[in-house]
Image (cartoon, helix red, strand yellow):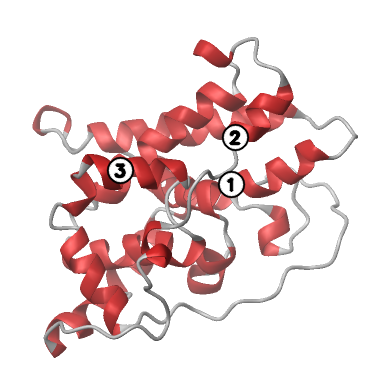
Amino acid sequence: MQHASHNGPAPQRHTALTLSDGEVDFLWWFIQGSIMDADIRSRLYDHWGMCPRHALAFFVVEAAFRPHLVHGSTILYNALMRNAVHLVGGHGPYRFAPEVLVRHKLCPTGPCHMCKLGYGPYSAGNAPPERLAQGRDFTNARMFAGENRTGWQPHVCGQCAAVDSPVLCRAHLVEAMQREKPIPMQFHRSTVECISRHLAKFERAFRWDSRGTDTDEDRGALIAAIGWCGGWREIVATFGIG
């Protein structure tokens, strides 16, 4: 990972994620197929996924119930990273777009889907106790993160993690673009393209004719995409970066 100093106060340290009954209950139903609803997908695209808490929760719950088929998160964040490549990489309709338009497109245009529905750290739910226990079990998620660390660790945002790194998540990239100083867009473009390229390979590996073709870097790109789109603080607090 390349390193460079950054200015500003260190971000607040977050504690590891603890999911409420309501969050587990909602996400259990969500991974059954609700994510495929066109209106819901549109809201998720508007927000660049979910907020940091619920983006990680989505991955954790899906991994808890489907450790070998973390497909919902992969489909969503693969689509978001493809969009990011068009924006940051200046491809397609944004090839000659002014920076102010790119910056605007990188900002959410709607709220987090789960937050808008009222789900948070204290929301109640009616799921059976065994389902709640399984949904709160981080074993599979931590194993996935640990085994595929090489695919996401280089992409941790220096601002989110309070480390000496030039890498930025989407939100901190927007902040950097709002300043008058020029920023190294080629560096950030390479980050986005790398994450997107590996995550596309991971999604493709879910197909029967491509099974077993994914690498640690491809699988880890899922966590990298979640972090790039929604921020890294919850991820770092849960999985660490060392």
The residue under the point 47% across, 67% down is: 53
Q: Are marks 2 and 1 in contact (CB under 8 Å)?
A: yes
Amino acid type assigned to the residue bearing label 1 in the image: His
Give the mark, 2 or 1, whose residue is nearer the N terminus. 1
SS at mark 1 in the image: helix
Which residue sits at x=19%, y=67%?
Answer: 28
In the rendered image, residue 232, in percent from the top left (x then y), is placed at: 57, 59
Tag 2: residue type?
Thr
- Write down the residue under mark 3: 41
Q: Which residue lies furthest to the bottom in this view?
A: 129
Secondary structure found at label 2: helix
Check the image and report above or below for 235 versus 76.
Answer: below
Lower position in the chain sequence, tag 1 or tag 3 = 3
Residue 191, disc: 2
Query: In the rendered image, which quarter is residue 18 located in?
Result: bottom left
The CA span between labels 2 and 3 is: 25 Å
Front residue of 132 and 37: 37
Q: Going 27% across and 43% down the picture, which residue do you hit?
A: 39
In 3D space, how far apart are the residues under numbered discs 1 and 3 (Cα atoms)?
Answer: 25 Å
Measure how far apart labels 2 and 1 are at the Cα level.
7 Å
The crowd level at tag 2 (other Cα within 10 Å; few <14, some 14-19, many 20+) is many
Question: x and y percent of residue 177 in the render?
Answer: 77, 36
Residue 155 is labelled as 1
